[in-house]
Amino acid sequence: MLVVKTEINTFMKENESREKEEMELTGNSRRDFLKKSSLITAVALTPVAAVKASELRLDERLSDAIEQMPLNIEINGKTYNLKVEPRTTLLDLLREKLNLTGTKKGCDQGQCGACTVHIDGVRANSCLQLAIMNDGAKITTIEGLAKGDELHPMQEAFIKHDGFQCGYCTPGQIMSAVACIHEGHANSETEIREFMSGNICRCGAYANIVNAIKEVKAGGNV
Ligand code: FES
Ligand code: FES
């Protein structure tokens, strides 16, 4: 390191006097000199191994080679055999890799419920799940709720009761609403409100959402 610093000092001195001569001859400003000396200082302060590794993109190549794990997962009845980075959330897998963008990203911190999906029939915030934790699982997203052109009764009820305004929270609300009935937690308005409290609606469509759930529960076909 000492040798490198000495060489750099020598180079900088030579460069400085050359720059002076150049300025006298060409009228160049000091800006070029400052650019060069900053670059040299940065190089002097960076460990040689790190510079080399960054040049070779070793970190990226290493993570490409190591950080891909197999994931076998069923989503909306379709089987996927994938390779994913261990840090990928289920939400990002759905949205970014599989283009299933019906599941929404709101807070990305487990606070809003916009990302609710069913994992083996149980509702979960997909932003709090690592994709690889769900190897072998069966996932249902909002895209998998309808049967072809026939909407799920909860989707019909949300439309009928005007259970949304902007619609951003709606996929999560509907997935939670279906689960709420399956769980046996839709026996009264108070109970519905309590067990839907993990799903935030910034448009405040709560009263209509509760009405939709009450109707579907009364219909008994979910
Ligand atoms: Fe998952 Fe808000 S995006 S809870
Ligand atoms: Fe807009 Fe719920 S309908 S956030």
Image (spheres, rainbow, N blue to C red):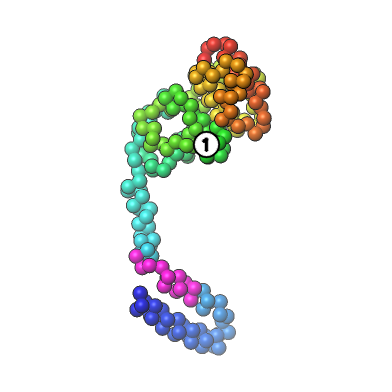
Q: Residue at x 55, y 32 (%)?
A: 113
Name the residue: 34% across, 78% down: 3
In the rendering, at what x and y percent does residue 198 appear? 56, 30
- Percent from the top left, x then y, of residue 89? 45, 39
Identified at 35% across, 35% down, the residue is: 71
Kind of element beneath mark 1 = loop
User: Where does the magenta region start and end?
Assistant: 37-49
Q: Which residue is mark 1?
A: 110
Q: Is residue 58 above or below residue 185?
A: below
Q: Does the magenta-highlighted stretch encompass residue 47? A: yes
Q: Is mark 1 within 8 Å of ligand 1?
A: yes
Mark 1, Cα crowd under 10 Å, few <14 / some 14-19 / many 20+, is some
Q: Quadrant of residue 154?
A: top right
Q: Amino acid at mark 1?
A: Gly
Residue at (36, 77) in percent of width and height: 2
The answer to whether residue 91 is visible is no
> Height in image: 37 above or below 73?
below
Residue 147, percent across and down?
A: 49, 19
